[in-house]
Image (cartoon, grey):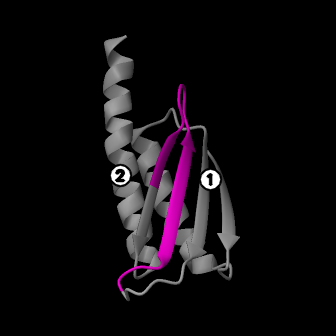
């Protein structure tokens, strides 16, 4: 799987990239039909201290692309929430693929 990172208003972080790569490789081992992942990280000024770090992940798979977005107080939490959302979507997609 090819993983691309894009940053908007955020300094590139090797530690964060390693965390994301580790989590994406883990779900790729369960769902081998993932072709590519695009990860977007950006900060947004908000009035709430519990948000502002946004992680968007787009997966290229057979059929329509899968997409998840999360907005939390840290990138680690945003990544975790987005990955969990994608795992649910991938499970549903895998079930549909088995049915055909």
The magenta region covers 50-68
Question: Which element carries disc 1, helix, strand or loop?
Answer: strand
Q: Going 40% across and 56% down the picture, which residue do you hit?
A: 83
**Does residue 95 lie above or below 23 as drawn?**
above
Left or right? Give the position of 66 relative to 6. left
Q: State which tag comes first along the sequence, 1 or 2.
A: 1
Number of the label disc, if any, that sits on residue 16: none
**Circle 1 residue:** 38
**Does residue 88 lie above or below 55 as drawn?**
above
Question: Which element carries disc 2, helix, strand or loop?
Answer: helix
What crowding class fits label 2: few (fewer than 14 Cα within 10 Å), some (14-19), or many (20 or more)?
some
Left or right? Give the position of 79 relative to 96. right
The part of the image, by quadrant, that contains residue 78 is: bottom left
**Circle 2 residue:** 85
Left or right? Give the position of 25 relative to 42. left
Q: Going 37% across and 86% down the picture, which residue do you hit?
A: 48
Residue 76 image point, x, y percent: 43, 75
**Does residue 60 lie above or below 86 as drawn?**
above
Looking at this view, is 38 or 9 the one in front?
Answer: 9
Which quarter of the rendered picture does the N terminus lie within? Answer: top right
């Amino acid at each position: 799987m090819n993983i691309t990172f894009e940053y908007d208003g955020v300094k590139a972080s090797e530690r964060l990239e390693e965390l994301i790569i580790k989590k994406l490789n883990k779900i790729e081992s369960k769902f081998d039909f993932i072709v590519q992942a695009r990860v977007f990280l950006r900060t947004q000024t908000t009035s709430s201290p519990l948000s502002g770090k946004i992680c968007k992940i787009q997966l290229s798979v057979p059929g329509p692309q899968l997409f998840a977005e999360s907005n939390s107080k840290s990138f680690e939490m945003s990544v975790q929430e987005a990955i969990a959302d994608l795992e649910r979507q991938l499970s549903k997609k895998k079930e549909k693929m088995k049915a055909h």
